[in-house]
Amino acid sequence: MTTNVKASRHRRKRQLAPYILILPAVAYLAVFMAYPFIKEIQLSFSRASLLSPNQTSGVGLDNYRTVLSDSGFASSLLTTVLYALGSVVGALLLGLVAALAMNHVSHASSFVRSAITIPWAAPPVAVALIFAWIFNNQYGVANFMLKRLGLTDRYLHWLDNPSLALPAILIVTIWMTFPICALILLAAMQSIATDQYEAATIDKASPFNRFLNVTLPGIRPTIYIVTLLLSIWALRRFDIIWVLTQGGPIRSTTTLVVELYRQAFQNRDLGLSAAIGVIGVALSLAVTVVYFVASRRAERAAGRSA
Amino acid sequence: MSRRTVLTGKQRLRILGRVTIVTVLVVFALFPLYWMLNVAFLPTSQMFRATPRFIPDVTRVRDLLGVLDQLAILRWLGNSLVIAIGTTAISLVIALFASYALSRYRFVGKGVVGFLLFATQMLPEALLLVPLYILFLGLGLLNDLTGLILVDTLFVMPIAVWILKGAIDTVPKEIEEAARVDGSSSLTIQVSIVWPLVLPSIAASAVLAFFFAWNEYLVATTFILSDEKQPASVGLAGLIGELTTPLDTVMTGALMYTIPAIVFFLLVQKRIVSGLTAGSVKG
């Protein structure tokens, strides 16, 4: 009898346990994420100013109409896509090259690994400060070295030139993110069984063929994950863009995140800012869905051919 | 090993190529940070020259110590430290319990929780900035380091849950069952048996949380209104384009903000890599 009661009490405790353990996390997300997110959607249908944010009046779809008919929104959308593509492709390629090189240069590898990874640890604001000086028009070392190498005959304007500001910010972004890509890809390469390489060597496969037929399939899932991480980071990034250019010159580095910040905290138009944010989230959600469908399909195709 | 002693010319060329690539990458990775150091040590008279000086003038160490008085850098770093430690502590406590529940139990709503955790990573900080601003205005948490800790935790705690869940998944259940037969409670088992086994991943999560908060700029620059509460990210960003602070002083400040992060990172980097990749690479 008593054991029965004890057992059922024990069972009830076990059933309750996960809810108690998960409660703080769920409560936290509810208060600081779900509630603000709903509030943001609500704001996107209202007119509100930063100066009196609690006085809102519903305006239906007006904010969305304004945003979608604004050419500035289209340009910031394009800038976001260019920035995301550039930083994903750049960091992935450079990370892959670094990982491949490190994978085969075994001696002194811990020094090399630390050295290559260090940029990832540097605070973005400090990074922005030094790159602002490196890209300085007159005294920047970037111009000095380009001229010395004969790549340009006159000093380039970087951050105050609408056609070079985005490339400059991409260089900074890739510098910050390629190390972590290299580390994750290197770990994936090292988990590929060595007998696969030995088999390739016996078959007298060229290094390029070995990369194509052994390394690449082995790290494919990791490449997907790194791509997803890099895209999410690119869509969220604010600090280096804001500190280096504030979205300028002439909006050339205004991504969606910069645009939504500017609408809210410079123009004080909370409704418009919220509408930009909601459209942005809808788009990135769509991209994520496409990504998951595509990567699953690619995985299945790879599985079939193997 | 002995097979490798004789290298053909082609192999030698290949090794040379790899070493060159690695060298170029190392220089690319380290140069901007070296330049930060170099400019910090440069006297203002040499700052604006057509040919930049490439070697830091180490005789200026004494001048640089004067920066401590000129800038509020120590106060800024102190604020950053408070935010980083607070964020790390709260994120870890919440994440440790949540990840154990997600790893070991089946319960109603598990999928929803998983989705919510993933969703935070999809949302840019900027999107939630306005509603959080309004919320904190009401709660009196604007211009308060606590407010920054709360927001930073929101973005970093889900990552910690993800890493820790991956780690706890790899701990065999049999270890816990043995302890349960001995009559230990679930909580005791979790704290005294499971947590020590996933220590590298706890360390990795802690470091990520610490770095996120140490680096964070957007929320801090929006929510902090008074000078004495600025963290280093906001204080230093305020110096850009401003003409009254000499460049070497700015760079010394940036250096003092960067060096602790790099030292900390080098001390723990092995753990970060194994912690980060445990979930992603094998999974």
Image (tube, grey):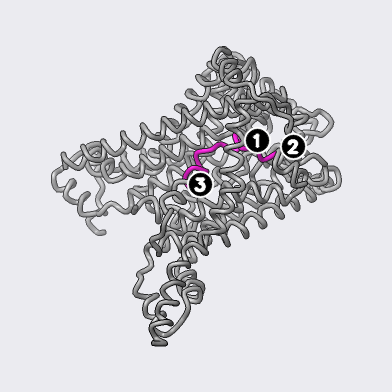
Which portion, as a residue range, is magenta? B117-133
Q: Nearer the viewer, mark 1 or mark 3?
A: 3
**Whole-number angstrom distance, CA of label 1 to CA of label 3:** 23 Å
Amino acid identity at mark 1: Phe
Badge 3 marks a residue whose secondary structure is helix
Amino acid identity at mark 3: Thr
- Residue B54: give its label: 1
A162 or B244: which is nearer to us?
A162
A223 or A19: which is nearer to us?
A19
Residue A292 in the image, given as x and y percentages of width and height: 35, 37
Badge 1 marks a residue whose secondary structure is loop
Residue B43 in the image, given as x and y percentages of width and height: 78, 36
The subunit letter for the residue under badge 2 reads B
| Residue indicated by mark 3 | A117
Is A176 rendered above or below residue B76? Answer: above
- Residue B42: give its label: 2
Is A241 left or right of A192, judged from the image as shown?
right
Magenta span contains residue B171: no
